[in-house]
Amino acid sequence: MEYLFQELVDDLFRTFGTPATLLDAQDRVLAFSDQPPELADPLRRRVLLVSDTETEIGRAVLHHVNDAARRASGIVRIPAAPHLELYERLVIPLRIRTSATAFVYLIDPDRRVTPEALEPFSTAFDAVAKQVELHRLARHQVRAAVAGLASSDEDERRLAVSTLDERSNVRWHAPLCSVVITGDAPVRNVPDGYWTRLLGDDGEWTELAGRIVAFLGNATPARLAELAADIASAPLAAGRPVLAAGVGEGVDRLPELSRSYRQAVRALRFAQSTVTDSPVASWSTLGAWRTVLALEPDDARESVDPRVRRMTTSEPAATLGMLRSYLEREADVEEIAAAHHLHRTTLYTRFRRLQERYGLRWEHGEDRFAAALGIRVAQLYDPVGKQELAPANHPAEL
């Protein structure tokens, strides 16, 4: 007897008149029956069925209901919890051998459902348990394929593309792009459902090297702008990480996404630096910063002129920011002086002293370029004076 998830919960509802919900072992909702307001407890319906499990009350609901189910060796009845607006319910673990792959929840305050009454569904329960496990294995293969798509090895990428073509449910409409997300705390502690909701249905993601790596289809500018806004204002629960993200350029085909991935990793470095106050950086907006970001941090530091390295390790970050603006003429000298509440004569005096102190000449094109480049490297990778540096006026939004 082959059962689909929705068919099972609908049959249970028709048979017993009790709202039914099917969850996998990671508390993801797979299917749910009708939830008539007069039968479904209001909070469980509001929290679970819209996947709002990241609030304090949402976690309390999961703790009350799901933790008891995980400890049970068979069908278990969960008592009501009036303080959580939860009715009494029956939980049926769906097992393959000794492992539960999914759980059926039946709201049953009137105790109409008994283990004996559920016996006719035993074949269906076995079929669904196997289906859930197959879905889990397929999801594992897709996540491995996402990691493979980021590989520098051509054979791994070819195998990853083949796996995604076979296993992923995503329809990969161009433009495609990569998004790499990290946080100020481990992202592995964030539930899978959060990333799935954040990234949407047009892509796949995995955790790789402590980061969330996502490949998205239909990555239009409007969609990426919306994603950037969601990342910047993500309403994470207490204790969850504050996020930063890099976004690679769009490509036309899956095999080309490894290039977008490398760009996203580099753009993430920019988003995490002192140069910007935006938590999201897009490779396509970074201009000349891309040349510096193409170097690994240690290589970038070693490439800096020794005189400039002494200057960037000795001078306050605010001074370095003013000097770079002057050398690159991002703004008129009058504007730079006004922004820092200085007279232009004072500004010129400071810049002249820097030349004398470090043996540099701003009228020489080579020294001017080396100093500007070295300051950029320091602003990207060295935290010295971070609290003093006003963000440079470089748009990093998507």
Image (cartoon, rainbow, N blue to C red):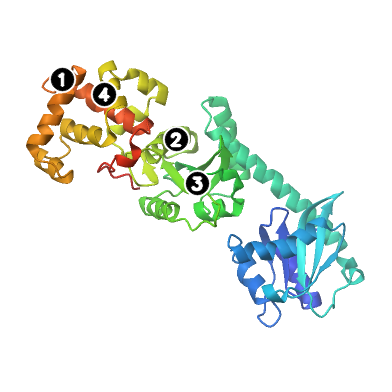
Q: Between tags 1 and 2, which lies in front?
A: 1
Q: Which residue is mark 3?
A: 172
Label disc, if present, on residue 356 of the rendered structure? 1
* Secondary structure at numbered mark 1: helix
Decide: few, some or many residues near mark 2? Use Cα within 10 Å; few <14, some 14-19, many ≥20: many
Q: Alpha carbon of mark 2 to alpha carbon of mark 3: how far?
A: 21 Å
Marks 3 and 1, the one that precedes in the sequence? 3
As drawn, is 136 to the left or to the right of 258?
right
Residue drawn at the location 92% of the way across and 70% of the way down: 116
Looking at the picture, how far across and down is residue 321, in whole percent? 24, 35
Label 2, secondary structure: give it.
Answer: helix
Q: Are marks 1 and 2 in contact (CB under 8 Å)?
A: no
Marks 2 and 4, the one that precedes in the sequence:
2
Which residue position is annotated with label 4? 311
Name which of mark 2 and mark 3 comes first in the sequence: 3
The mark nearer the N terminus, 1 or 4, is 4
Q: Is residue 231 left or right of residue 109?
A: left
